[in-house]
Image: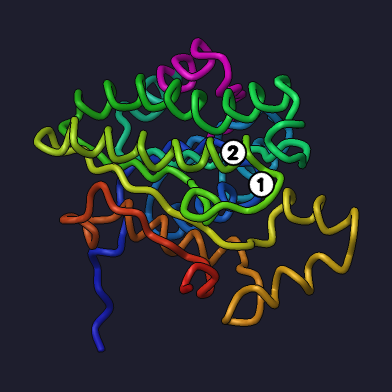
Amino acid sequence: MKADNRISLDGRVILISGGGSGIGRAAAALAVERGASVVLGDKNVSAAERVAAELGRDRAMAHPLDVVDASSCATIVAATEARFGKLDGLVSAAGLTGAAAPLADCALKTWNSVIAVNLTGMFHLMQPAIKLMLKGGGGSIVNLSSVAGLVAVPDQVQYIASKFGVIGLTKSAAIDYAAQGIRANAVCPGGTRTPMLAEWVEADPSRERFLAAGHPIGRVAEPEELAEAIVWLLSDAASFVTGAVLTVDGGLTIS
């Protein structure tokens, strides 16, 4: 069977927040494999630099990024244009969870920090990215939500609210810019083997067995499995897909 050449990112430029680790790193690696150049934005610049070195400096550039700071987001978009001349895709993968607590006990500091990164930070980055995409005639945005953006789990009000918000933010971008050639979609991962998950499991190793058992497929995802979904949405193979919420969760939200 002939390969589908539309699942290609040849010549495209993709900006990825959280590109130094986890799903962002996996998405960057696959995007480069499929022909793209990538800009890896991360608060942990050393991690982003390591990934850029692994992928090849001719096709990958690391840049400091703090999504909480709107000026930092504007700066990385400007650096992307200066280096590559355009922006074809944005993957927003930066995020955090915050300390677990029921709603009435959630510290305001926890609420504010998670909303600032997961939701407001995404808004900060989308604004300059969309403006640059419009200059080039369009593009594709993929925002990382979560199964926690579809169903609630106990003691994570700040994370759940932020991830539900990501879906609304994504749909707003999709309706605002569909006629101008920009598509925006959200991906909702289930449990995925990322540094965030590793930290959670390290506190109690039994958690991974519990989490795997909650997925009908019987395991958590590898970041590379999420990357496949992200790259598909970035590519022309998804040319008629916008405002969608793609659940990649091993069946976790089936019922």
Q: Is residue 77 magenta?
A: yes
At a point 74% along the width and 50% down the height, the residue shown is 195
At a point 64% along the width and 51% down the height, the residue shown is 22
Q: Tag 1's secondary structure? A: loop
Residue matched to label 2: 18
Q: How many C-alpha atoms fall within 10 Å of the one at disc 1: few (<14), some, or many (≥20)? A: many
Residue sitting nearer the eye, 135 or 193: 193
x, y percentage for residue 56?
A: 56, 46
Q: Amino acid at mark 1?
A: Ser
Dot 1 and dot 2 residues touching (CB under 8 Å): yes
Image disc number at residue 21: 1
- Quadrant housing residue 105: top right
In the rendered image, the vertical position of residue 52 relative to residue 246, given as above or below = above
At a point 27% along the width and 21% down the height, the residue shown is 131
The magenta stretch is 61-78
x, y percentage for residue 156?
A: 67, 43
Q: Is residue 108 left or right of residue 24?
A: right
In the rendered image, the vertical position of residue 154 relative to residue 61, given as above or below = below
In the rendered image, the vertical position of residue 3 relative to residue 150, given as above or below = below
x, y percentage for residue 225?
A: 52, 67
Residue sitting nearer the eye, 79 or 172: 172
Extreme residue in the bottom direction: 1
Image disc number at residue 107: none
Q: Amino acid at mark 2?
A: Gly
Residue sitting nearer the eye, 234 or 6: 234
The answer, for residue 13, to whether it is visible in the render is no
Extreme residue in the left direction: 179
Q: How many C-alpha atoms fall within 10 Å of the one at disc 2: few (<14), some, or many (≥20)? A: many
Mark 1 → mark 2, Cα distance in angstroms: 6 Å
x, y percentage for residue 36?
A: 39, 48
Q: Is residue 65 magenta?
A: yes
Q: Tag 2's secondary structure? A: loop
